[in-house]
Amino acid sequence: MTTSTHHGTEEWPTQLRLPGQTAAPEGPVDMTMMYVMHHAFRRDLARFAEAARRTPVEDRTTWELLEWRWEVFAEALHHHHSGEDAGLWPWLLAHGTEDDRATLEAMEAEHAEIDPLLSACTQGLQRLATHADEDARAALAVRLAATRDHLARHLQHEETGAIPIVQRLMTAPDWKRLEEEHFSKGVSPRRLLVLVPWVADELPVEVRDRLLAEGGGLRLVWLATRRRYARRDRAAFRYV
């Protein structure tokens, strides 16, 4: 990541700005992967909310693909939120001020509000993958819209409220240690075969290429998986 912002003798990374992102606070920590994940979450929930309204209730094949695609999204979101709850928020609470506490505790509370919405959406998609149930489709459309809106508010709050705290309290080595322990850890090679093409989808080409170049063998994974993933993804969202 190029650096251009200076603070005394310290050189700060240029922060990434992606479509839909609400802020990119300056500081010593390169938040690229955080913003890339936020981009993927926003992208997916917008697609799912529209797919629930447009996909014919009797098209079982597409609902089965949507159920698969939801599992990809939900597992990525769960892993991301678990890393924040177990690692990031506790670290910031331990090092921050009393004024920081309200924001950080709100982050945890917002995760807890989103969890039941995710579970309800999972149940709705499972139902529609096996039954042509118009009532279930109507309920799912409402739940997906609510999940999209809740997560959008949470990501905005995180980008405008919590990430400035990260930038004020953490150094780049602090972030690297936390990221390795709570975000990168536990992602199996098999999981990477789905996560790499998933996270790269709809990223600006220059961002995608830089991300894949910095990730060791990630470009090879992407080249090996992108076509099959794209075919299944297009089929799942064929009515969007």
Image (cartoon, rainbow, N blue to C red):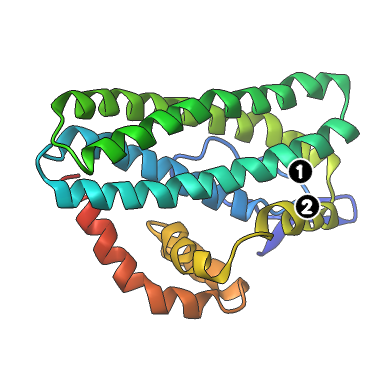
Considering depth in this image, is 63 or 240 the residue closer to the camera?
63
- Residue at image location 15% in from the left, 40% down from the top: 55
SS label for mark 2: helix
- 8 vs 103, left or right, is right
- Residue 204 showing in the rendered view: no
Give the residue type at disc 1. Gly
CA distance for labels 1 and 2: 7 Å
In percent of the image, x 59 and y 26: which residue is there? Answer: 112
Residue type indicated by callout 2: Leu
Mark 1 in CB contact with mark 2 (< 8 angstroms): yes
Q: Is residue 29 visible?
A: yes
Question: Which residue is painted at 20% across and 42% down in the image?
Answer: 130
**Rendering coords of residue 234 (x, y %):** 23, 57
Residue 40 spot, x, y in % from top left: 45, 49
Q: Say which quadrant the C terminus sits in.
A: top left
- Left or right placement of residue 166 versus residue 32 in this view: right
Query: Image quarter for residue 168?
Result: top right
Give the class, few, some or many, for how many residues have Cα within 10 Å of label 1's Cα (few <14, many ≥20).
Answer: some
Picture disc at residue 87? 1
Q: In the rendered view, tell whether residue 234 sits above or below residue 45.
A: below
Report which residue position mark 2 lands on: 178
Residue 107 against residue 211 in the figure, above or below: above
The quarter of the picture where the N terminus appears is bottom right
Q: Quadrant of residue 132?
A: top left
What element does badge 1 sit on? helix
Q: Earlier in the sequence, mark 1 or mark 2?
A: 1
Q: Nearer the viewer, residue 116 or 235?
A: 116
x and y, in percent, of residue 149 in the image = 42, 26
